[in-house]
Amino acid sequence: MSWSPKNLYNVWRRTIGPKSNDLIFKVTTEETLFQQRWRSKAAVRAYHGEYIPEKVFKRWYLPDTIPDVRPRRRVFADDKNDLEEYAKRRTRAKELERKQEEEIQQKGLAPVGSLMFMEVERRLDVFLFRCCFVHSVYEARRLILHGYVKLNGKKHSKANTRLAPGDMVSVDPDAIRFLKAPHGPVDHITKQPGSVEEEPPVESEAADADAKPASKTDGKETAKTDGEADAEAATETALKKASPFHLPQYASPWLFIPAYIEVSFKTCSAIYVRHPTARPGYSEIPTPYDADGAVIRYAWEWYVHRRPRMRSQSQLARMPEDRTITLQKEKLAHKDRRPFKFNRGLYGKSERPWRPSAPHLDVAAGVGIGKATLISQ
């Protein structure tokens, strides 16, 4: 995952370029089903978490099942059916179900196969990349490890942490390379906005001739020239005060924000609103391949037959941090904890004062120098 031109070129070759024919699977082919699934898995993993080892991906970032995103039908019990019939809401519910069925027929089923990468998208480094704060996942890992990223207001240095809905991530603006002046000359920047190219002076034939007397129009031209110079000076001053913004080349295909992220570029912070989901004809997981195509389906079928089937307690202890599980444990611990109740009656029956005063020193008159007497209240 990178904005590099080489990476963009490789993605283009695999999706719509000359290498895309290798991922078009036909019914009549000499390849076996094993070969088609392996090729699909290799192509998909080359984009989604290519830096994650295959063993780690299968153990921690591969979901047990694909989530069910179909609309749930409401089931009423007791006398709710009669009440709904009396209130004439049953017809509205049937109309809503009919519209949902028509949408499924027009757009097809929800592409749930792409949701197999939901755990990868929850990672903190991938989250920063989707927020367009960094140009690559490796740059995001550098910012996290060097302490430039805060999770819910606290410094966080684990790049493999999976976020929970509602988590806020903020980045130090001084660490973002887009907001810094580029080091060295930049070839593709020719001139600043609002600048005017100066034309070389043209030598006249009568250069040695006597100067003509000044006219009234010369004063107006001089005033206009002074006004233009002041405007240019003001523009240059404003450009110097503004923070630099340097976007890499070929970055436009990556400039998008998924629907499950809310970003504030003014404060360099973002909120993980909810987990990615899918609906008929649309998937929130960014992928260069068809979300409901054969490549994604074959990749899922490959991992279904080769997933690790056993997770012992020692393996679960080494699991990367999952904020959802952490919050659930904290909630259960807080629920089991008994609240402290202050019983004023117990202290009222005792003879002890509420705030016992400490003894103090007092120098008694007529006593030798340096001697003191303890007087307690």
Image (cartoon, rainbow, N blue to C red):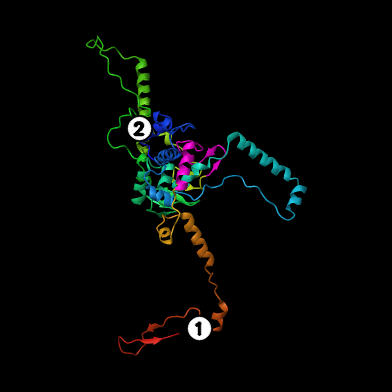
* Residue 290 belongs to the span the image colors magenta: yes
Question: Dot 2 corresponds to which residue?
Answer: 236
Amino acid type of the residue tagged 2 in the rendering: Glu
Question: Dot 1 corresponds to which residue?
Answer: 352
Going from the N terminus, do you reach mark 1 or mark 2 first?
2
- Residue 70 vs residue 134: left or right? right
The quadrant of the rendering that contains the C terminus is: bottom left
Q: Position of residue 114 (x, y in %)?
A: 49, 42
Rendering quarter of residue 235: top left
Residue in the picture at 35% in, 41% down: 177
Whether residue 177 is visible, yes or no, is yes
Q: Position of residue 21 (x, y in %)?
A: 43, 30
Rendering quarter of residue 253: top left
Circle 1 sits in a helix, a strand or a loop, which is it?
A: loop
Residue in the picture at 50% in, 83% down: 352
Residue in the picture at 56% in, 47% down: 68
In the rendered image, the vertical position of residue 77 relative to residue 355, given as above or below: above
Bounds of the magenta span? 277-305
Residue closest to the far right: 86
In the rendered image, the vertical position of residue 163 relative to residue 290, given as above or below: below
The quadrant of the rendering that contains the N terminus is: top left
- Residue 302 vs residue 211: left or right? right
